[in-house]
Image (cartoon, helix red, strand yellow):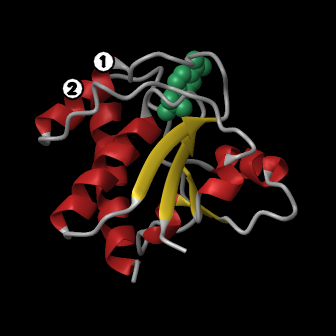
Amino acid sequence: MAKSILFVCLGNICRSPLAEGAMRDAVLKAGQEFLIDSAGTGAWHIGNPPDPRSIAVAARHGVDISGLRARQVEQADFERFTHIIALDRNNLSDLKSLKPEESEARLSLLLDHLPGREGQNVADPYYGDDSDFTRAWQDVSAATAEFCRSLP
Ligand code: 4NP
């Protein structure tokens, strides 16, 4: 089965759109092709574009995420995606509760893919400032680049 990757945070407007954008960029640069998407465990921002601060930090790194729209994780995601990657431990625990028994999707924490950062959250920048968004970008770009390298 071809690899397909879903990034999941709480709102799908700050961290997981950054992860989706960074992963698309890494995959493109590696000359690979995967299905890549993102979603939120919460429903508050369905249909909304990413937070302007996420759009800005991605744009500063040459990645355009302005066309993304938030959606909520749904049961079909557990069949559609081979890898579902949580941005923080709360997201991972919610995903474990939602995962149907028959789903073969591999659930993991994003920073588990970055040596030295295992078990850590990508901190939620929503109530923070630009420096928190910069940190979130640094975390997701380093981890997605490493994850991309690790995929056969
Ligand atoms: P995200 O950030 O999970 O990285 O998209 C958040 C966005 C919105 C909210 C919380 C976190 N919110 O409470 O509305």
Position of the C terminus by quadrant: bottom left
Mark 1 surroundings within 10 Å by alpha-carbon count, few (fewer than 14), some (14 through 19), many (20 or more): few
In the image, farthest residue toward the right: 101
Marks 1 and 2, how far apart in space?
A: 6 Å
User: Is 117 rendered above or below residue 95?
Assistant: below
Residue at the location (35% across, 33% down)?
132
Q: Is label 1 in contact with label 2 (beta carbons under 8 Å)?
A: yes
User: Residue beneath label 2, please?
Assistant: 56
Q: Quadrant of ligand 1?
A: top right
Q: How far from the left and from the top, in percent, is residue 43?
A: 66, 21
User: Residue beneath label 1, please?
Assistant: 52
Mark 2 surroundings within 10 Å by alpha-carbon count, few (fewer than 14), some (14 through 19), many (20 or more): some
Q: How far from the left and from the top, in percent, is residue 33?
A: 31, 64
Amino acid at dot 1:
Pro
Element type where label 1 sits in the image: helix
For this view, does 57 lie left or right of residue 85? Answer: left
Asked which quadrant contains residue 91, the reply is top right
Q: Which mark is residue 37?
A: none
Amino acid at dot 2:
Ala
Residue at the location (84% across, 55% down)?
100
